[in-house]
Amino acid sequence: MTDPLPQPLTIPGSQTILVVDDVGVVRRIAFRVLSEAGYRVFDAESAAEALEVLTTIKRPIDLAIVDVVMPEMSGVDLTRIILDRWPNTRVLYMSAYQAEVMVREGLQNPGVMFLAKPFTRDELLSKVRAALQQAPKRNDEEHPTRRKPKQ
């Protein structure tokens, strides 16, 4: 019987998360819970602000938690931009809307990580841990929300 591979040591504050949601209370709750759990957290209320944060910070984002339904640009469209520019970013979608809305927004692939709102502290932390354990998609791998190039 072989020993399981040891889990890599994660130093508190070494993993960075961006929370993108147009609802302030959701951002504040997620920010507080994740910060208290030892993550370095940034937040944005819109796609434009999220892209500004991503271009100005000096370290990569390990995980983007993105609301699917936002004004001006959907979370799915924002994620496509993020993954094109920062392909090592993991993504966790969140929404309070039904599955039909999710399909309309482009999340037909059941392999995407999803957090239903409203969420509890334990649900948020569990989903974040699961999302961070996934290997980031490489440029040559297909992410569920990345559009395939036209032939």
Image (cartoon, helix red, strand yellow):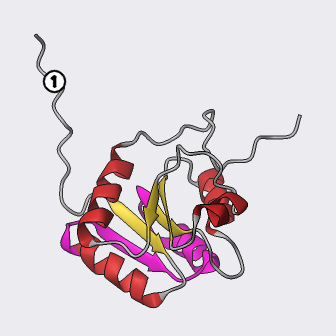
In the rendered view, tell whether residue 116 sits above or below residue 70.
above
Q: Secondary structure at mark 1?
A: loop
Q: Position of residue 46 (x, y in %)?
A: 59, 80
Q: Is residue 64 left or right of residue 9?
A: right
Q: Which one is in front, 23 or 6?
A: 23
**Is residue 136 part of the magenta span, yes or no?**
no
Q: Position of residue 76 (x, y in %)?
A: 64, 62
Q: Which quarter of the rendering shows the N terminus? A: top left
Q: Which one is in front, 118 or 69?
A: 118
**Is residue 43 part of the magenta span, yes or no?**
yes
Q: Which quarter of the rendering shows the C terminus? A: top right
Instruction: Pick out the residue farthest to the top.
Output: 1
| Amino acid on which disc 1 is placed | Pro
Q: Is residue 110 left or right of residue 121?
A: right
The image quarter containing residue 13 is bottom left
Query: Badge 1 is on which residue?
Result: 4
For image coordinates 38% across by 65% down, the residue present is: 17
For image coordinates 30% across by 64% down, the residue present is: 123
The answer to whether residue 28 is seen in the rendering is yes
In the rendered view, tell whether residue 116 sits above or below residue 135.
below
Q: Which one is in front, 121 or 52?
A: 121
Question: Mark 1, residues whose alpha carbon is within 10 Å: few (<14), some, or many (≥20)?
Answer: few
In the rendered view, tell whether residue 100 sits above or below residue 70.
above
Residue range (magenta): 36-63
